[in-house]
Amino acid sequence: MHRMRRWSVRNARWLKKLYHGIENALTLCHPLFERVGYQRLDKSFLAIEKVTKGLLIDSQSCGQCIVGFTGLSCPMNCPKTMRNGPCGGVRADGKCEVKPEMDCVWVMAWEGNQQLGEKEYPIQFVQPALNNQLIGTSAWLREVRNRKAVDNEI
Ligand code: SF4
């Protein structure tokens, strides 16, 4: 899995575009999702996310995905679940303080950000604290609902 993590970070640019494309397509399905019921769909979407995102980025299904900001490096793979940059213990060779056999997810996040080719590095945006109640729910469906909520406010 660690090898796939590295591959995804190296290919962060087009993977991020693909990720957003999926979210855009799902947003178009919002009326259908509403009719069926988001709650009823959550388990099915979570299962799809576990397979796809699990394979590509070793996603831990936190339900509040921020890999678009972290260069496709899932911060939930950090043993300390740091969501706003690395702890103070990153080793000189970029390996994790707690698990020296793996690269620090935040070193990888920085590498992924450099691959994105964007004017600003999204890694610089401060992320909200992890909401434990959302762990094990679909991040895609949440993103669709968040987008529609913003649309309705405008
Ligand atoms: S070194 Fe990196 S991956 Fe390891 S605990 Fe610290 S922030 Fe997390």
Image (cartoon, rainbow, N blue to C red):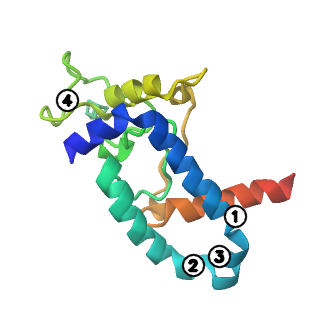
Quadrant of residue 70 in the image? top left
Residue at the disc numbered 3: 33
Question: Could you tell me how far apart the alpha carbons at marks 3 and 2 are, in whole angstroms?
Answer: 9 Å
Identified by mark 3, the residue type is Phe
Q: Which residue is nearer to you in this view: 48 or 149?
A: 48
Res 28 label: 1
Give the residue furthest to the top.
92
Q: Earlier in the sequence, mark 1 or mark 3?
A: 1
Mark 4 or 3: the one toward you: 3
The CA distance from mark 4 to mark 3 is 43 Å
Reading the image, the residue beneath label 4 is 97
Kindly check if marks 1 and 4 are in contact, taking CB atoms under 8 A apart as contact: no
Nearer to us of marks 1 and 4 is: 1
How would you rate the neighbour count of disc 4 (Cα within 10 Å): few for under 14, some for 14-19, many for 20 or more? some
Q: Which disc, if any, is residue 39?
A: 2
Residue at (87% x, 51% y) in the render: 154
Identify the residue shown where x is 26% and y is 44%.
Answer: 4
Label 4 beta carbon less than 8 Å to ligand 1: yes
- Percent of width and height locating residue 108: 33, 30
Q: Vertical placement of 94 versus 139: above or below?
A: above
Decide if residue 142 is on the left or right side of residue 83. right
> Which one is earlier in the sequence, the residue at label 4 or at label 2?
2
Q: Nearer the viewer, mark 2 or mark 1?
A: 1
- First-in-chain label (1 vs 4): 1
Disc 3 + disc 2, Cβ < 8 Å:
no
Secondary element at tag 4:
loop
Q: Nearer the viewer, mark 1 or mark 3?
A: 1
* The furthest residue to the right: 154
